[in-house]
Amino acid sequence: MSAGADRAPLWQEEAVAALVHELRTPVTTIRALSEMMMQAPDMDGAERQGFLSIIAAESQRLGRLVDEVMDVARLGSDQAELRREAVDLGDLLREAVRLASPLLAGKDARIALELPAGAVVAPGDRDRLLQVLLNLLSNAARVVPDGGGQITISLEAGREAVIRVRDNGPGIPPEQREAVFQPFRRLGPQGTRPPGTGLGLPISRRIVEGHGGTLGVEPAEGTCFVIRLPLPESEGSA
């Protein structure tokens, strides 16, 4: 065993450092606004409500960052644990669409679901796979146009299960299709990128790889993420 065998991977150390830095912003905001409210008991009601709305939003952001810290710590370890249970992938996609649909509220956009006739069951961790799908759908919801936005999530089964999440947004340049899976890379042109550390796709890829599968980007109009998962022998096509 090498001397550095017990050392966390470099990407994990950098990710944790970036997340710890990100944590300071909502903590500072929550503390500052709380102190201002305590020092001004007669504060105008509308102003107080505005402060409370910011505190609530920053608290949610704080929770998401804590979840990312836990994901990075877990997935950077060789001892990352994924449950192994029979997952009906069709039901999983239906649940992902149900949870992601509110992200399109007010955008005049829709999510289409394409499923095969029969059930497709794969061994895996349902919660983790759902996390991956929601990450891909939320990315798509963010980039589709406000008018006529279209997201399609589909499932095919042969020797493996193939899940595609396609959108009619601006797409990812060919030279960036692999780079988006590197930590700290964020989708979208400069100025429109969402706040955060850009760890959603790297974490999603590691979850899929933990299932023995792959996550990548296929050439397409717009963007098409594709997940490939191994199926039991009995699930293969005839």
Image (spheres, helix red, strand yellow):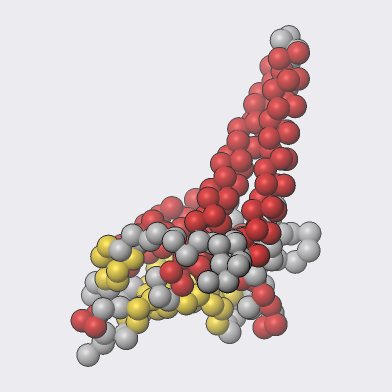
Residue at figure coordinates x 61%, y 42% from the top left: 61
Foreground residue, 51 or 112? 51
Q: Quadrant of residue 233?
A: bottom left
- The percent coordinates of residue 5 (x first, y second) are 56, 67
Foreground residue, 221 or 30? 30
Q: Quadrant of residue 115?
A: bottom left
Residue 223 visible in the picture: yes
The answer to whether residue 178 is above or below residue 65 is: below
Residue at figure coordinates x 47%, y 65% from the top left: 78
Foreground residue, 98 or 54? 54
Residue 70 lies left or right of residue 113; in this view the side is right
Q: Quadrant of residue 144?
A: bottom right
Residue at the bottom extreme? Answer: 238
- The percent coordinates of residue 199 (x first, y second) are 61, 60
Quadrant of the image containing the C terminus: bottom left
Residue at figure coordinates x 56%, y 52% from the top left: 68
Residue at figure coordinates x 59%, y 75% from the top left: 223
Residue 85 lies left or right of residue 220; in this view the side is left
Residue 110 visible in the picture: no
The answer to whether residue 41 is above or below residue 212 is: above
- The percent coordinates of residue 169 (x first, y second) are 62, 70
- The percent coordinates of residue 40 (x first, y second) are 75, 12
Foreground residue, 78 or 81? 78
Residue at the top extreme? Answer: 42
Marker count (numbered): 0
Residue at the right extreme? Answer: 191
